[in-house]
Image (cartoon, rainbow, N blue to C red):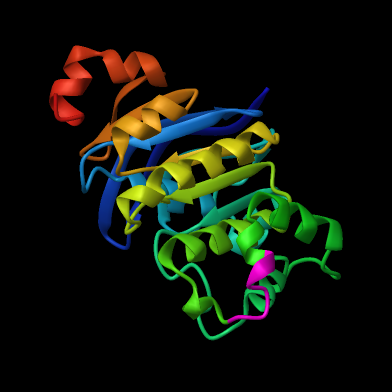
Amino acid sequence: MTLLDVVDLDAGYGDLQVLYDVDLTVEAGEYVAVVGPNGAGKSTAMKAVFGLADRFDGSISFDGEDITGLAPEQVIRRGLSYVPQTENVFPSLTVEENLRLGAYVEDEVSEDRKRAVFERFPVLEERLDERAGSLSGGQQQMLAMGCALMLDPDLLLLDEPSAGLAPDLVDEMFDRIDAVNDGGTSVLMVEQNAKEALRRCDRGYVLASGENRYEDDGEVLLTDEEVRQQFLGG
């Protein structure tokens, strides 16, 4: 079943158009990666889906419902959660306070969902009463993902989850994303580490200059000579 369907999307910011006729789909339970060079429009595509970029044309539907033009607070209620690349936690608040804010659209914070987050990210329970700003970069990224998962979304949008992490933490972050997907949450991820993203995902898209260039299974794109030479460094 198609969960997310983006068709002929033109998007950008104000008078600046960044995306041109971009198509993206995510099936239920699927793990999809979007890769490409800097300035390709990858993050803009993610923001457009979540209502954070201006959409000029095209359509976005989620679980069969047209969500084109909805604001983020409306999108999140449909079952999508989004983790930005930067400034994705409140550093002056505790880990617990951040998690509670992750579920802000709920009338009551679900202890079961919090427990599920702790099972995926045990360090968050260990540091529950500490300020988020005291966590390492990797732990802050886990907290940001934990906040997004507090609403038990059908689709998790991740924007450059490995950005800024020490090399020895990158594999751990990808392992945790794998586990989230294995638990039944669909994932749409924009990622600078293109080779690892394509190695891990079910299916991938390559964007360049705001347009679709390639789409295929992750392993197929990873071994495609043209894709490797143009976008993966050979």
Q: Is residue 124 among the parts visible in the rendering? A: yes
**In the displayed structure image, the side of residue 7 where residue 176 appears, left or right:** right
Which of the two residues, 219 or 35, is positioned nearer the viewer here? 219
Q: Quadrant of residue 53?
A: bottom left
Which of the two residues, 227 or 80, is positioned nearer the viewer here? 227
Residue farthest toward the bottom in the current orientation of the protein? 92
Residue drawn where x is 42% and y is 65% of the image: 137
Which of the two residues, 23 or 79, is positioned nearer the viewer here? 79
Q: Is residue 18 above or below residue 213?
A: below
Residue drawn where x is 48% and y is 79% of the image: 133
- Percent across and percent down for residue 187 are 56, 38
Q: Is residue 196 above or below residue 159?
A: above
Asked whether 86 falls inside the magenta stretch, the response is no
- Percent across and percent down for residue 231 are 19, 30
- Percent across and percent down for residue 158 are 48, 49
Q: Quadrant of residue 33?
A: top left
Residue drawn where x is 53% and y is 31% of the image: 31
Residue drawn where x is 51% and y is 57% of the image: 83
Q: Is residue 22 among the parts visible in the rendering? A: no
Q: What segment carries the magenta color? A: 125-130
Which of the two residues, 31 or 93, is positioned nearer the viewer here? 93
- Percent across and percent down for residue 230 are 14, 26
**Across the whole image, how many numbered discs are drawn on residues?**
0
Q: Quadrant of residue 155?
A: top right
Quarter of the image containing the C terminus? top left
Asked whether 128 falls inside the magenta stretch, the response is yes
* Dominant secondary structure, magenta: loop
Quarter of the image containing the N terminus? top right
